[in-house]
Image (cartoon, rainbow, N blue to C red):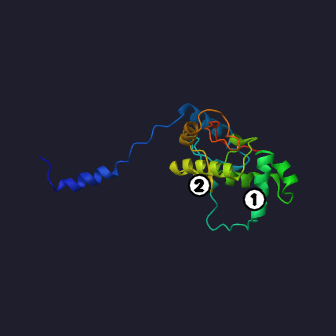
Amino acid sequence: MTNEQDAPLEQETASLIPPPKPTPVFDARQQRINELRLKFCIRDEFPITKNMIHPDGTLNQDYFRPPKGARMESVRKWTDKERELLIRGIERIGIGHFREIAEEYLPSWSGNDLRVKTMRMVGRQNLQLYKDWKGNEQDITREFELNKAIGLKYGAWKSGTLVADDEGLVAKAIEEQWPSAGKAPASGDNSSVSTPLNDEDVEME
């Protein structure tokens, strides 16, 4: 018979046992991504890159955080009018054509500025899913809320955007949320779509 005095000790010991880790999704794909990181991310001529990833190829999130005590540079603010013009450009020209949108609607901003602002409005770090996508403010808000919900659920909501996770849970959630068309829905279309599983950020014009 167990001594009653031993019960608190058993409970304390049990509480120290970590919960089982969730089964990784897309193990083969993630292993391949980690192998590519190990092969290409670390550059001998840039010693600091040795801190970018862990020995198993997973990202070292601390590497990408600003150093303690770092002063943030002043950021140029977007006006409501400029945001409205960007949305108008997205609706007429489409995401990914930021240089063209800048030339026609926002010449004081660069194409990259528009890309970053669009990432914030849509709520996705990777805009490949939205290449050539056209949508109005209501459509953009819908995409933002969908992406935010996934990001908050899996701890992948960083700086106002949905980012990839090493376990592949975000990619799986996106695939389940949008299983059919392989691209973001057109303006006014609430049907489901899917996204490429590799959520690495891509450069657009």
Q: How many angstroms separate mark 2 from mark 1 (CA)?
A: 32 Å
- Which numbered marker is on residue 3? none
Pointer 2 with pointer 1, Cβ within 8 A: no
Q: Which of 197 and 149 is in front in this view?
A: 149
Q: Which amino acid does label 2 sit on?
A: Asp
Total residue callouts:
2
Q: Determine crowd level at label 2: few under 14, some 14-19, many 20+ residues with C-alpha closer than 10 A.
A: few
User: Where is mark 2, residue-wise?
Assistant: 62
Instruction: Report the residue that reaches farthest toward the front.
Output: 188
Q: Where is residue 200 in the image (x, y as percent from the top left)?
A: 66, 42
Q: Is residue 6 above or below residue 24?
A: below
Q: Residue at x 59, y 46 (%)?
A: 59
* Quadrant of residue 5 within the rendered picture: bottom left
Q: Which amino acid does label 1 sit on?
A: Arg
Dot 2: element: helix
Q: Which residue is drawn at 64% across and 60% down?
A: 66
Q: Position of residue 18 (x, y in %)?
A: 38, 48
Q: Is residue 65 above or below residue 36?
A: below
Residue 131 in view in this figure: yes
Q: Which residue is drawn at 28% across and 54% down?
A: 12
Earlier along the polypeptide chain: callout 2 or callout 1?
2
Instruction: Report the residue that reaches farthest toward the left.
Output: 1
Residue 78 in view in this figure: no
* Quadrant of residue 178 within the rendered picture: top right
Q: Which of 177 and 52 is in front in this view?
A: 177
Dot 1: element: helix
User: Where is mark 1, residue-wise?
Assistant: 83
Instruction: Name the side, left or right, on which 71 lies relative to 58.
Output: right
